[in-house]
Amino acid sequence: MARPSVIPVVRQRLEAYLEQCETAYLEQPESTRSATLPRTGDGKVNVRAVAQAIDLKPTQEKYLYERDELTSLINLVAEGQGLLPIGSRLVQDASDKAIKERLARQAQTARADAQAAVEATAVQDELLEKVRELSLDNERLSAENLRLRAMLDAMDQGLHIRIYG
């Protein structure tokens, strides 16, 4: 014979406890309200303390995490009191993972950009050296061109010129 489910009993105790917490919360002056649900140091609802408050056995505590109908009741009151809901650590871990992945991608992009900048600087230096060489060649060729024109002018005027070289 199957044992009767403990969930209806747990739900009944939980609803009564949450009603007490909500009433106590609403009785506080609005300007100084603080959460009446048990909480952890980082602002999350303390499910273990809720389980102890409604006299659950340690083996029954898992129902508050696993059963959606119980989790949603706690989360509703917790969020109303400004606490992070059950499972927020999982959401936070996923968010942290996404941030870490984005930072890793940005670091990888930054490394690639730095490498590209180094390569671009090297190419720029090579091009500047080539421009210097071509400028010197241009000056040398201009001077040679000027000398040859002067020789041609002298030959046109009847001078006999010997070219060595």
Image (cartoon, rainbow, N blue to C red):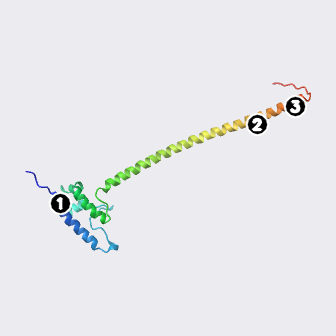
Q: Compared to 41, does 153 lie above or below?
A: above
At which x and y percent is residue 78? 28, 63
- Residue 92 drawn at (x, y percent): 35, 54
| Image quadrant in which the C terminus is located | top right
Numbered tag placed on residue 153 in the rendering:
3
* Dot label at residue 10: 1
Residue 19 numbered mark, or none: none
Q: Alpha-carbon distance for marks 2 and 3? A: 21 Å
Q: Give the residue at x 70% y 36%.
A: 134
Nearer the viewer's eye, disc 2 or disc 1? 1
Residue that numbered label 2 is attached to: 139
Q: Are marks 1 and 3 in contact (CB under 8 Å)?
A: no
Amino acid of disc 2: Glu
Query: Residue flagged by tag 3: what amino acid is it?
Result: Asp
Residue 11 to residue 129: above or below: below
Residue at the (18%, 56%) spot, across then down: 60
Numbered disc in front, either 2 or 3: 3
Observer able to see residue 54? no
Give the mark, 2 or 3, whose residue is nearer the N terminus. Answer: 2
Q: Position of residue 22 (x, y in %)?
A: 25, 68
Judge from the rendering whether residue 103 lies leftward or rightward of residue 16; answer left or right.
right
